[in-house]
Image (cartoon, rainbow, N blue to C red):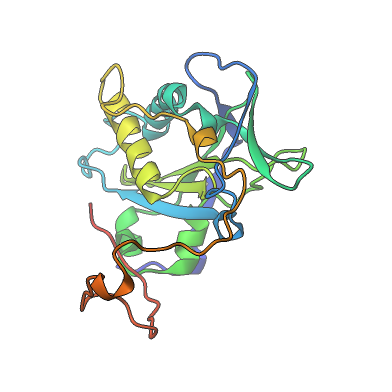
Amino acid sequence: MAYHKESLKLEMKEVIYVKPSSPIPSSILSLSDFDLRNDCNGMGQIILVYQSSNLDSPNNKLDPFLVIKEALSKAMFYYYPLAGRLVENGDRKLSIHLEPNHGVPLVEAIANCHLSYLEYLDGNDVEIANKLAFDLPLQDKNGHQYPLVLKVTKFLCGSFTIGLGVSHVVCDGVGVAQFFKAMNELASGKSEPSIKPVWKRECVLVGSINKQPFQDPMGMDTLAISPYLPTSNLVHGCIKFCL
């Protein structure tokens, strides 16, 4: 049974700030020149949908919000840059500032329906997705942007969604997938993630730009041509991933 957009009501809890499981020292992290491109300075929004395996007894299970909160804190120990703040320097470039009291904004919401009424978001309804996304301020009181924000929405059936917002300056799609894999591993009882991230972006800083054109030693005539390369006629579409 489809649910009308106007009928979806959310009871919002107060935002909490999840800190890394172990304190992080005050520090400033540099970003690479690739990160500081203007087209990367945005917040990407992702909605993850989790169907309950106990639809007949939704109350007889762990609270997903508490599980996510604990897993997020443990993951922050390894992915500590996501707990910081993006601060614009005097040269209008961004860097990540870390303080011991910093944490990731996390908010809990309670929906007034079953997730099946929303067709498990299979309808690609943007209005409903916007309600499930983190729709609170993306900056702190000083105007500094959060690299990561999360919103957990729980449904009457025991299913839930995770609305994740992540700064593209700090993390790309592959990085987000790796981060969530780490959260899943830590939530399932592992003591550490199978892949530990390394922050070495200061090694990818361009001191000066070489304005001489690049000379291909092989020559342009020897380049392989693929029939699968995109043409100038690009089509924008909505892609659904089923994991």
Residue placed at 31% from the left, 26% from the top? 187
Residue placed at 35% from the left, 47% from the top? 174
Q: Quadrant of residue 97?
A: top right
Q: Looking at the image, how many numbered discs can be counted on the residues?
A: 0
- Which quarter of the figure is the N terminus placed in? bottom left
Rendered view: 14 above or below 112? above
Horizontal relation, residue 173 to residue 40: left or right: left
Horizontal relation, residue 3 to residue 94: left or right: left
User: Residue furthest toward the bottom?
Assistant: 233
Q: Nearer the viewer, residue 56 or 237?
A: 237
Give x and y (percent) for residue 119.
30, 63
Residue placed at 51% from the left, 50% from the top? 168
Q: Is residue 57 visible from the viewing direction of this image?
A: yes
Give x and y (percent) for residue 50.
30, 46
Q: Is residue 59 visible from the viewing direction of this image?
A: no
Q: Nearer the viewer, residue 75 or 202?
A: 202
Rendered view: 77 above or below 235? above
Give x and y (percent) for residue 213.
50, 64
Give x and y (percent) for residue 72.
43, 29
Horizontal relation, residue 34 to residue 99: left or right: left
Q: Quadrant of residue 116?
A: bottom left
Rendered view: 67 above or below 21? below
Horizontal relation, residue 6 to residue 98: left or right: left
Rendered view: 137 above or below 58? below
Q: Nearer the viewer, residue 120 or 197?
A: 197
Residue placed at 62% from the left, 26% from the top? 102
